[in-house]
Amino acid sequence: MKRAQLFTLAGLMMATSGFATATSINFQGLDANRSALVWMNSTYLSGDLMLNGQTATSATTVTEQIGLGVLNLTFDGSLQLQDAFCVDRFRYISNGNYTVNITAPNTVNNGDRAAWMVHNILPQINATLPGTTQRNMAAALQLAIWDVVQDGGDGFRAGRIQKSSQVANPTDSIILNLAKNYISQSIGQTYTGAQIINNVNVGALTQRLIVDMPGSGVPEPSTWAMALTGLTLAAFGARKRR
């Protein structure tokens, strides 16, 4: 095994005990082939840094277009890319190098449930041929993670993350239906094998990220069946709206 790969695996394996000593990542942003731009309503609280760079002075709901999908990073100078997702909708992270601590999924709200989605749905995304469907699935998974962590998985009906109903800038119905299906699949499910990446070398709070340990398994056949059902329902729902 190459030295870089050893560093990567060592950094990830430390997380199995629930916490880890500091390691480092190089954050490289959205994967252009597994992401999509999506219109959503976001409710910022006073003091939150908004996507437009301004600071909210009171509770403010904004319709905005957000890049959603798989995030790319590497561990400890490795060249091997690792897939990740964001668990903090209202924090931000720029591309670059960070010193991080790795903790268990239950260190964030509903983290074990979000980890189950990453562990079971990300392999389906990666097994899908590149193109619109794969991009939609990746964006939907990120939306589902945010809804579960931020709003308890209410299906975007209330809370701080909601669908946009603006005529000019609606939330894509296929992505929205897929996200709702992922949320539904995850009800009552938990997974403890993923890791939360916490940045520790910056003054301001930045996004925490979630990754799944390489080689930790594949989804069960029942999960694949649910995914196919979700894709069918999403396409059917979009067709009815036309």
Image: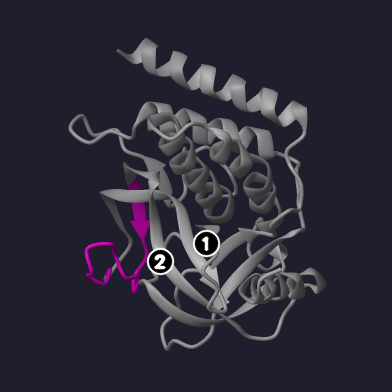
Visual colour scheme: one colour
Picture layout, residue 239 above or below residue 80: above
The residue at the point 74 percent across, 72 percent down is 15
- Residue shown at the point (57%, 30%) measured from the top left: 181
Residue 101 location in percent, x, y? 62, 80
Quarter containing the N terminus: bottom right
Hey, what amino acid is under mark 2?
Gln
Q: Nearer the viewer, residue 132 or 152?
A: 132
Asked if residue 3 is among those painted magenta in the image, a careful observer would answer: no
Task: Tell me whether the residue at label 1 lies in contact with that at label 2, contact meaning CB atoms closer than 8 angstroms.
Answer: yes
Q: Position of residue 224 (x, y in %)?
A: 68, 28
Q: Which residue is mark 2?
A: 28
Q: Which residues are magenta?
A: 41-56
Q: Camera-side residue: 52 or 24?
A: 24
Q: State whether residue 21 is above or below residue 217.
A: below
Question: What x and y, as percent, mark residue 30?
Answer: 39, 56
Q: Residues within 10 Å of mark 2 (few under 14, many from 20)?
A: some
Q: Earlier in the sequence, mark 1 or mark 2?
A: 2
Residue at 36 percent of width and 55 percent of height = 43
Is residue 43 highlighted in magenta? yes
Q: Quadrant of residue 53?
A: bottom left
- The CA span between labels 1 and 2 is 9 Å
Does residue 148 lie above or below 198 as drawn? above
Using the image as rendered, state which of residue 207 and residue 223 is in the foreground: 223
Q: Residue furthest left?
A: 168
Instruction: Determine the residue positioned at 55% across, 49% down.
Output: 145
Q: Main secondary structure of the magenta part?
A: loop
Q: Pointer 1: what residue?
A: 81
Which kind of residue does numbered mark 1 sit on?
Leu
Residue, far front: 1
- 188 relative to 65 in the view: left or right: right
Please tell me whether mark 2 sits on a helix, a strand or a loop: strand
